[in-house]
Image: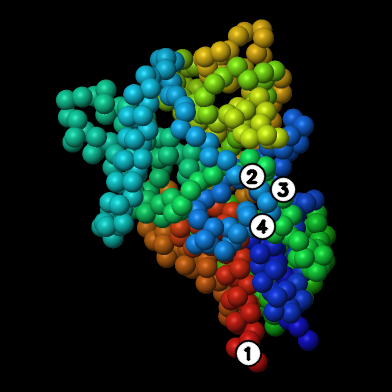
Amino acid sequence: MSPKIAIIGAGTAGISCARTLLEYGFDVTIFEARDRIGGRIHVSNEFGKPVDLGPNWMHGDTKENSALSYFKDASVTLHDIGSYGTIFAPNGMQYSPDKVDYLEEFMWKYVEEAIEYSKENAATIDPELSLYDYVKRVAKDRYPDNAEMQEQILMATRIFGFYIGEDVKRQSLKFAFLEEPSPGENLFVASGFASILQNMAEKVIDKVDLHLNTPVVEIDTSVSGVNITLNSGQSIAFDAVVVAVPLGALKKRAIAFHPELPARLLSAVDSLGYGRLEKVYIRFPRKFWSLDYYEFFAPAYAPHTNPEKGPMSVISLAHLPEPYCQPVLLWYLYGELSQKVVNMQTDGEKIAFFEPYFSRIPGYEPGRDEPAAIISTSWSNDPYAGYGSYSCFTVGLKEGDIDIEELRRGLPERNLWFAGEHCSDVLQLATVGGAYGSGTHAGHLVVNHFESKN
């Protein structure tokens, strides 16, 4: 008889784990708390054309990562956002094109330098130091008599927060090397992730026993095999379980484990950071702008709504290829600022929040270009997303690389494994490709475990 395996979560990791187990003839049941599969892959069609509420990007080279082959297999349209953009200074004025190039070069230069420093000195770096601390010190050393240059370098560095999902002031310098960008291109998925999800799930979902709207509340490994308890109170026996829920859900103890997870594994869960990246799509009556992207550095012109001067990064969807282009600006927010926007109660309140920014973009005409509609994410308030977006490495972390390995290893002695972007290969952490690869990894661990017993 084939081993019966339960998978908790029907996101990317859960689906890829199921695919691997099915290939080896295992009997697979998936429990999903939501009313849909996909996890953070979720597409809205409220504008008439798709916009992704979860991931937007393909990170890395499909030749080097088999998980990313699904981008090609799904016949998606990828788009290079381009290099035509501008940056607004704290006073609301645009920097000159030469200055923009200069600042963007600074951002990557100092971030890459911090990552290299982290690689070489991780063992001796104080866990309380941030990437921001490192750049601040280096900028002061190199430009001791130029306070303006120091400040511009620090503002440019904070844009890296949109990649890690958290403020660089909270990004661990000790483990900055774990945030090294994936090798290869970073391309925007213009056609959306719906076809990618469909391609991943093809020949999987119809071969498993899938239970939607079914949160799991307890996993008992004290018995032979495991017992899964649902929120309905029903308990079901399996031979093993793969927990493919977000890191944030583990941190919030959304599922009770009996016996409790080992102290070292709990330490890994609690020590790793969990970012808060949110997105807001604003649709306008027409495309009044001309550039591919806009950055807003430490805005000082909205003191009542953005007193912390949180930066923003904006991408034009009007420059996507047909048929996906639309007069929409996509805003990325992270950290405290993202939480503030998520907690706003009405669309009008949100539009008023963004007005000081979009009204500064050249071509905007009051009365003619008032926003027509808005879509915003709320992952930070979503219990099934773990109240956040994806893993990150924050100050105070002492053993981040070992923490990841603890999660990847799982607890084979208890027939219990984990999957998700937080359990992925280092260069794929916090990505869809990483989540997919982690599911495949966990599936093979399960297969090897049962094969070794025969």
Q: Nearer the viewer, mark 3 or mark 2?
A: 2
Q: Which mark is residue 453?
A: 1
Of the two numbered discs 3 and 2 on the same chain, state the one appearing first in sequence. Answer: 2
Q: Circle 3 sits on which residue?
A: 194
- Residue at 35% across, 43% down: 111
Question: Which quarter shows the C terminus?
Answer: bottom right
Residue type highlighted by circle 1: Lys
In primary-sequence order, the first of circles 1 and 2 is 2
Kind of residue at disc 3: Ala
Would you name the residue on which mark 4 appears? Answer: 73
Asked which quadrant contains residue 124, the reply is bottom left
Q: Amino acid at mark 4?
A: Asp
Q: Secondary structure beneath disc 4?
A: helix
Q: Secondary structure at mark 2?
A: loop
Q: Is residue 413 visible?
A: yes
Q: Which residue is mark 2?
A: 77
The residues bearing labels 3 and 2 have C-alpha atoms spaced at a distance of 12 Å
